[in-house]
Amino acid sequence: MNVSVLCDAVCSLFPQINRDLLVTAALLHDIGKLDAYEVRGAVFEQTEAGKLIGEPVLSERRLSAAIVEIPGFPPKYHLLLSHLVLSHHGEFEFGAPILPSSLEALVLHHVDNLEAKTNGVLSIMKKEEDPERVWSEYSRLLERSIYLPRLETEGDIREGD
C-alpha cells in the first residue's frame, strides 16, 4: 500500500508519468509473493516456485492470467504492466529478470526500494532499546550501521555528536 501511495505522490510532482499505469503496477507488483512464499510454523519460507522462478515472474504470471480474463484489455497496457512488474527489483543481482526500461518502471523500482529501505531503518531504530546507543549493529540488509539519533528538536544536534 505504501508503494502505491508514494507512486501517486511522485506523479503529482512529475505529470509526465502515466499515473494509472504506475499506480496499477504499484498495487500489483508483489502479487507473486502469494506463490513465492509460504508460512511454515512462525516463519515465511520460499516455495520451490519462489526459488526456481522468482517473485517478479510469478507476479507477472498472475497479472497476465487476470488480464486475459478482461475483455478488450489494451495489449499495449498489458505489455507495459508486465514490464513494470518484471523489472521492479531493478537489477539482475536483486532478482529482476529484466531491467527497468521506461519512466514508470524506473519510478516503481526506486519507490519500492525507498519503501523497503525506509522500513528497514525504522525497524532497526524500533528494536534498539538502549537510549544511550548512537549506532545500531551492522545491518546486512542495508550494508551499514544506522545512526540512532534521539532528537526532541532540531536544536538537539550538537557539533561533535
Image (cartoon, rainbow, N blue to C red):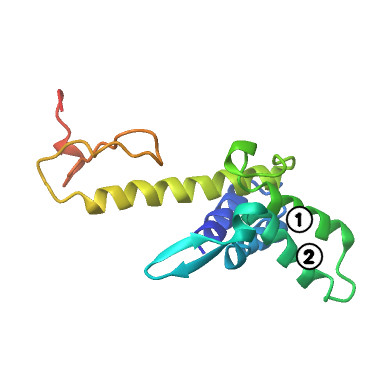
> In front: 34, or 114?
34
Q: Secondary structure at mark 2?
A: helix
> In front: 159, or 78?
78
Find disc 1 in the rendering and name its residue: 82
**Residue 44 vs residue 102: left or right?**
left
Expressed as whole percent of the image width and height from the top left, the position of residue 99 reads 70, 39
Looking at the rendered structure, which numbered label has been put on residue 64? 2
Q: Quadrant of the C terminus?
A: top left
Q: Residue at x 48, y 46 (%)?
A: 114
Q: Given the image, on which type of amino acid does mark 2 rest? A: Ser
Expressed as whole percent of the image width and height from the top left, the position of residue 126 reads 25, 53
Q: Residue at x 29, y 34 (%)?
A: 145
Expressed as whole percent of the image width and height from the top left, the position of residue 160 reads 15, 23
**Residue 73 vs residue 104: left or right?**
right
Residue 148's quadrant in the figure? top left
Of mark 2 and mark 1, the one earlier in the sequence is 2
Q: Residue placed farthest to the left in the image?
A: 132
Residue 34's quadrant in the figure? bottom right
Are the residues at dot 2 and dot 1 in contact (C-beta closer than 8 Å)?
Answer: yes
**Residue 98 vs residue 14: left or right?**
right
